[in-house]
Each structure stands twice: as structure tokens, then as C-alpha cells.
Amino acid sequence: MSDTIFGKIIKREIPADILYEDDDVLAFTDVSPQAPEHFLVIPKQAIATVNDIQPEQAELVGKMVLAAQKIAKDKGIADDGYRLVMNCNEGAGQTVFHIHLHVLGGRPMTWPPG
Ligand code: AMP
């Protein structure tokens, strides 16, 4: 699979405001924030869409959520609340085909999202 922009961020070929990294996941600020706090958590392993996640990758996806939780707590947005979003395919607005968890917070979130 050819590299996406997120693959290039993992390899430090393009810059990003990196918030968290471990052996399995990386988190960085979204370049086009939709909330006062908007960051992305990605697996280092390239998975194109949520449709492509395999059962053996369930722990990896769980680690993405735990990284989101940790950063949200560190940023002080956890108690007020934050939103986790994973867009799957073009119809849902996915533009980068390396799965990523959007974490949005720092303002009230409306529902439904539209
Ligand atoms: P999605 O539309 O769900 O695929 O989300 C892709 C997200 O990646 C968008 O919110 C973009 O603003 C964000 N994005 C694209 N390129 C970069 C980049 N170089 N650094 C940080 N965020 C990016």
C-alpha cells in the first residue's frame, strides 16, 4: 500500500505537532481544527479504513482509545467531555486512508453531528 500523509508523519518525513507516541500509536494535533482541541490518534500500522480492521487488531484499536483518553485528561478536557470520531470511507468524510481517531473537545458538542 502506498504511503499516506499519516505514514509520512510516522516516519517523520513531514512535520506534525506530536502529542503522544508509543510502540503502537501516535497522536498529533489536527492541522485544520474543528474545535479548540482537535487531535488525531493513529496506529503506526497502516490500516486503510475501519472496514479493514481485523479481529486480531482489536487490542490496537483499544490502545488508540486509551491514548485519546490519556491526552484528553492531560489537556484538561476529559471532565467536561470530548467526542471521538472515526470516519469510514468517502461517504462519511474520510480523506486520509490510514485509520484515525478524531478527538474533539474544549467546546460544547451538538448532537446529531450532521
Ligand atoms: P478524515 O477527513 O476523517 O479522513 O480526517 C483527516 C484529518 O486529517 C482532517 O481533519 C485533516 O485536517 C487532518 N490532516 C490532514 N493532513 C494533516 C497533517 N499533515 N497534519 C495534521 N492533520 C492533518
Image (cartoon, grey):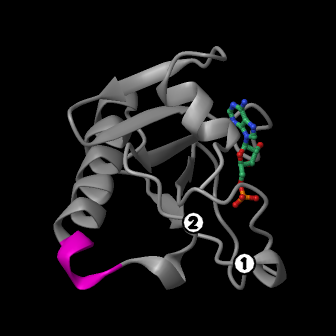
Q: Residue furthest front?
A: 1
Q: Is residue 14 left or right of residue 80?
A: right
- Quarter of the rendering containing residue 113: bottom right
Q: Which residues are magenta?
A: 54-58
The secondary structure that dominates the magenta segment is helix
Say which residue label 2 marks: 48
Q: Is residue 5 above or below residue 60?
A: above
> SS for tag 1?
loop
Q: Is residue 50 above or below residue 61?
A: below
Disc sitting over residue 108 in the figure = none
Q: Residues within 10 Å of mark 2 (few under 14, many from 20)?
A: some
Question: Looking at the picture, which amino acid does disc 2 mark?
Answer: Ala
Question: Looking at the picture, which amino acid does disc 1 mark?
Answer: Asn
Report if residue 57 is visible in the image.
yes
Marked residue nearer the N-terminal end (1 or 2): 2
The image quadrant where one finds the N terminus is bottom right
Figure quarter occupied by ligand 1: top right
Question: What is the x, y in percent for residue 36?
Answer: 67, 36
- Quarter of the rendering containing residue 33: top right
Callouts 1 and 2 close, C-beta under 8 Å: no
Question: What is the x, y in percent for residue 66?
Answer: 23, 53
Say which residue label 1 marks: 89
Residue, x 32% and y 41% (percent of image)? 25
- The mark closer to the camera, 1 or 2, is 2
> SS for tag 2?
loop
